[in-house]
Image: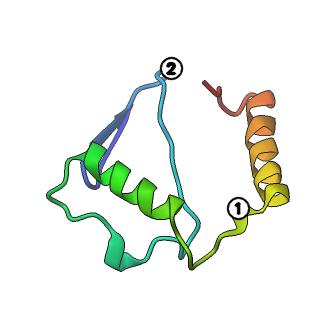
Amino acid sequence: MSFHRRRLPHIYSSGQSLFVSWHLHGSLPHSVYPPGKLLSGQAFISVDRHLDNAQRGPLFLRQEAVARIVADSIRRGAELGHYDLH
């Protein structure tokens, strides 16, 4: 089991499901990071909406060919047994 703290404490147990999300570097300007007073669910929604409506920054994943490469790479990692997708 591993533990670390950022916005909230994170505890990782072996064999347990883990939700992972990320964004491209530069796609979320520091000025739109959610304030620390938001609950984690509210912060997630705030960031998700901003990323969905972004007009600037790296927008590579809007290109179908690039998005397909990323999705295929994620699926390939699961096929190789690096992780399970749910």
Q: Which residue is mark 2?
A: 15
Residue 11 is marked as none
Q: Which residue is mark 1?
A: 62
**53 sits left or right of 58 in the view:** left
**68 sits left or right of 30 in the view:** right
Seen from the viewer's position, the closer of residues 22 and 59 is 59
Query: What's under tag 2, amino acid-wise?
Result: Gly
Give the residue displayed 76% in from the left and 54% down from the top.
Answer: 67
In the rendered image, the residue lying farthest to the left is 37
In the rendered image, the residue lying farthest to the top is 15
- The colour scheme used to paint the residues is rainbow
Of mark 1 and mark 2, the one earlier in the sequence is 2
Q: CA distance from mark 1 to mark 2?
A: 33 Å
Element type at mark 1: helix
Element type at mark 2: loop
- Residue 11: image quadrant is top left
Picture coordinates of residue 30, whole percent (x, y): 37, 77
Give the residue displayed 56% in from the left and 79% down from the top.
Answer: 56
Q: Neighbour class for label 2 at 10 Å: few (<14), some, many (≥20)? A: few
- In the rendered image, the quadrant that contains the N terminus is top left
> Height in image: 86 above or below 45?
above
Give the residue displayed 81% in from the left and 43% down from the top.
Answer: 72
Query: What's under tag 1, amino acid-wise?
Result: Arg
- In the rendered image, the quadrant that contains the C terminus is top right
